[in-house]
Amino acid sequence: MRKKIMRLGIGIIMSVIVLSGCGGSSNGKMASDTMAAYPGVNSVNSEVKSDSIYEVGMLTESQDKKESVQMGERKLIKTVNMDVETEEFDGLITKLRERVGELKGYIESSNIRGNIRYQESRNAAITIRVPSGELENFVNEVAEISNIVRRSENVSDITLTYVDVESRKKALEIEQERLHSLLEKAESVEDIITIEGRLSEVQYELQSYASQLLVYDNQVDYSTIHLNISEVKRLTPQEEPSILERITEGFSDNFSAATKMLVDLFIGIIILSPYWGLWVLIVLAIVFFCKGISTIQKKKYMAKKQEIENRKKEEK
């Protein structure tokens, strides 16, 4: 009984092996027939295979770059925000412009508000770009020629982002070269249109990545300083003032404010004098006019009264 079961099992296994061999040969024959009917399939498969190898190679290269950059030079964007005070507004602005020029930097934007003619305190908002290596020296020089009220710094690490963009750009450049080679070998109009369409997309993406890298390079090579400058008559003390100093300062500020108010009032009266003079003339004219009418009426009244008295005398 056991021998029969073993023979039956061996027979089943042999049948399965024979059927598998037949199926494999059939599939192989079908694949070879397909390759023979469509010769382009072989080239497409080889292109896909090479693309896969290429993508793996690019990923490996990108990873190697990331690791090497982490161990070496990093791409850092540095930004400094400063609020400063000065008693010599024009002098500070001039010194800043001269120093920025000496450092081969530039002023990205400048906005000055206020008018000294009307005794208004002026304010300036200036965005300055200086080489990254000179940032610390420039900030220290600003601290020497002005009074810093607030200062903050921010550093953004874009190393990995920069490497990714750079790797994508390199990949597109290689793809562009391969598309040019395929375009030279293309025979049908459909293939030419397809390759040229992809080539246009690659060129557009290349320009986008190149512009992005230029922006990153500018942000990394030139640090940004946002400088807010306030013109003051007295600098804010760096240390907490004593009670006597606070009383003296408060009295001085109030006295200055009262003096300024009186001066402004006097100036306002002088400035508005033409209007006051005109109103005075109008009021005087009205007074004289009313006085003249009153005089005339009084004379008429006196004349009439005299006439009545004369009649009474005649009647007697």
Image (spheres, rainbow, N blue to C red):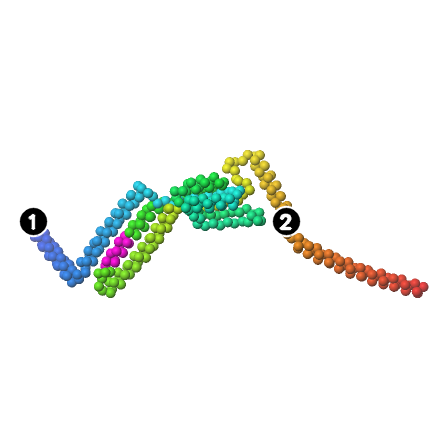
Q: Is residue 62 visible?
A: yes
Element under disc 1: helix
Q: Tell me how many marks there are.
A: 2
Whole-percent x and y of residue 10?
8, 51
**Within the magenta stretch, is there residue 54?**
no
- Rendered image: mark on residue 6: 1
What residue is shown at x 25% (from left), y 47% (from top)?
60
Residue at numbered disc 2: 267
Q: Give the residue type at disc 2.
A: Ile
Whole-percent x and y of residue 139?
44, 41
Q: Give the residue type at disc 1.
A: Met
What residue is shown at x 20% (from left), y 58% (from top)?
44
What residue is shown at x 51% (from left), y 36% (from top)?
239
Residue closest to the eye, 257 or 218 = 218
Give the mark nearer the N terminus: 1 vs 2. 1
Q: Is residue 71 above or below residue 17?
A: above
The magenta stretch spans which residues? 171-182
Q: Is residue 166 above or below residue 313?
A: above
